[in-house]
Image (spheres, rainbow, N blue to C red):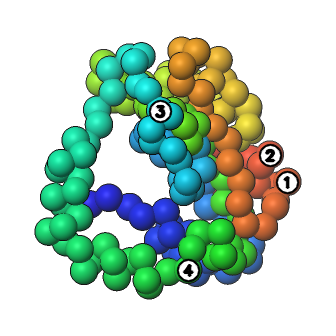
Amino acid sequence: RQLVDDELYGLWSLFRPGVRIFMLSDSCHSGTVAKDVNLQQITAGHGQVRVLPAEIQAGTYLAHRSFYDGIQTGYPPGDLAEVNASLILISACQDNQTAADGARNGLFTGTLLEVWQNGDFHGNLLHFQRSISERMPWYQSPNYFRTGMPSREFEQQRPFTI
């Protein structure tokens, strides 16, 4: 099913202060997994992009309307959710961009795996995002997004470590 942004923020708000959440999102319009993306201004035009056709999206919503409406009413709007954990998101693109497919995975995931080099990558989280970005095409810009409680120690960590 599709994830609703308010649901993500609501779930993140359940974590206690001091918890570190590292999230990767290889999806279109994933810069902050936030609302207010003006889809009329977005044009794919570059790379191969898998998009859920509007009629399927609408049909899915209508078939499960009470479920999705329950999610919307069950969580506060994302900008009102109090996130006490430290969350860092590295996403495939900006909120106004689409995420291209790669040969085997999404282009972002494939590039991330190249940068990670089976664990041979030794920089911090921001360096990881920048290293991925440097290898991406000009029309897809991976984002580095923080929310919740700032944690310099967390940001200085090597990816995928505790």
Tell me what residue is drawn at x 76 percent, y 55 percent: 154
- From the viewer's side, name the closer residue of 71 and 19: 71
Given contact means CB atoms under 8 Å apart, are the residues at marks 2 and 1 in contact?
Answer: yes
Q: Name the residue beneath numbered marker 4.
A: 76
Q: Residues within 10 Å of mark 2 (few under 14, many from 20)?
A: few
Asked where in the image residue 83 lies, by quadrant, the reply is: bottom right
| Gap between marks 3 and 2 measured at Cα | 34 Å
Pair 2/4: label in front: 4
Where does the N terminus fall, quadrant-wise?
A: bottom left
Q: Which mark is residue 152?
A: 1
Q: Amino acid at mark 3?
A: Ile
Question: Can you say whether 148 is above or below 114 in the image?
Answer: below
Is 39 placed left or right of 161 in the picture? left
Q: What numbered label is drawn on residue 156? A: 2
Q: Secondary structure at mark 4?
A: loop
Amino acid carrying mark 2 in the image: Gln
* Rendered residue at 22%/41% (across/down): 53
Residue nearer the viewer, 30 or 160: 30
Residue shown at 42% from the left, 64% from the top: 4
Residue where numbered disc 3 is placed: 42
Q: Is residue 135 left or right of residue 28?
A: right
Q: How many marks?
A: 4
- Where residue 40 sits: x, y (%)? 45, 38
Q: Earlier in the sequence, mark 2 or mark 4?
A: 4
Q: In this rendering, which labeled residue sits more in front, label 1 or label 4?
A: 4
Mark 4 neighbour class, 10 Å CA radius: few under 14, some 14 to 19, many 20 or more:
some
Q: Amino acid at mark 1?
A: Arg
